[in-house]
Structures are given as C-alpha cells and as structure tokens.
Image (tube, grey):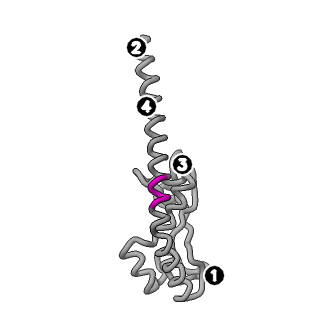
Amino acid sequence: MRSVRRYQLFLRAYADAALQMRRLADLVIACVVLAATLPLALLVALAIKCEGPGPIFERQTCIGRAGRRFQTLKFRTTVADRDHNVPVWARKTTQVGQFLRCTRIESLPQLCNVLRGEMSLIDADGSSPTFLD
C-alpha cells in the first residue's frame, strides 16, 4: 500500500513540474516572439488605424483551464460597428483584415494573454463560450 501512495505522490509531483516547465517555456517563447515582432505589430496597428475609425484591438471572451473566462486580444480585421447591431460573423472584413487573416498576424496580440498566464502556447485551448454552452 505504501508503494502505491508513493507512486501517486510521484505522479502528482511530476505533473506539477511539467506544468511549471510548460509555463516557463510559454514565458520565454512569448517574450522572444513579442520582442521580435514588435515593429511588425506597430506597423499593423498603424495600418488598422489609417484604414478607418475604430479600435485597433478586438476582444473575444474565451474559456480557459478550469472553466475560467478571459478576454483574448486580436487585431481588428472587420469594419467597426459602434452600435453593435451587426453580428460578429456578418461584419465586413477590411483589406488589412484580409491580409492579417491570411497570414494569421491577427492573433499576435494573444501573446499578451500568454504572458498573463491566461493562455498557453503549448496545447493552447481558448474555446469560445458560445460553442461550449
């Protein structure tokens, strides 16, 4: 019986160490990628602002580990709707937004969510609450 208990303690310690290593890898990779892509992010922000009025970033509610909700950041790829009359899926995509979606640069600000510990680069799972409800 003692050997089973020791084995369970070992597995728990191993899982905790794996989570800590994953978090460390997330922090290092996110910092390096953010530093390397900062000039690109500034150019994208400038292009979005020059293309039309509205915010540079869009926020989307996602569900993370243990059902915790958080706001992910993305570059805005659609025409801004101040009155919120048009559903998100029906909004018109901007020219800059088409390029951002093709190259997946729109998700670059999500590295800030990784730095805050809300998301992970490794096995990232930020599901939308509308799909889970």
| Tag 1–tag 2 contact (CB < 8 Å) | no
Question: Considering the image in quadrants, where does the N terminus appear?
Answer: top left
- By secondary structure, the bulk of the magenta-drawn segment is best described as helix
Calculate the distance from the C-alpha at mark 1 to the C-alpha at mark 2. Answer: 63 Å
| Tag 3–tag 2 contact (CB < 8 Å) | no
Q: Kindly identify the amino acid type of the residue bearing the numbered disc 2.
A: Ser
Q: Is residue 22 above or below residue 104?
A: above
Label 4 crowd bin: few (<14), some (14–19), many (20+), radius 10 Å: few
Q: Which residue is mark 3?
A: 67
- Residue 43 position in % (x across, y down): 49, 80
Query: Which numbered disc, 1 or 2, marks the residue closer to the eye?
Result: 2
Residue at 52% x, 88% y: name it.
Answer: 51
Q: Work out whether residue 127 can be spotted.
A: no
Span colored in magenta: 28-32
Q: Earlier in the sequence, mark 2 or mark 4?
A: 2
Q: Which mark is residue 3?
A: 2
- Residue 50 position in % (x across, y down): 54, 88
Extreme-right residue of the structure:
83
Q: Earlier in the sequence, mark 1 or mark 2?
A: 2
Residue at 47% x, 53% y: name it.
Answer: 28
Q: Which mark is residue 83?
A: 1
Q: Is residue 10 above or below residue 80?
A: above
Q: Which mark is residue 119?
A: none
Q: Work out whether residue 20 can be spotted.
A: yes
Q: Is residue 45 left or right of residue 93?
A: right
Q: Kindly identify the amino acid type of the residue bearing the numbered disc 4.
A: Tyr
Extreme-top residue of the structure:
1
Q: Which mark is residue 14?
A: 4
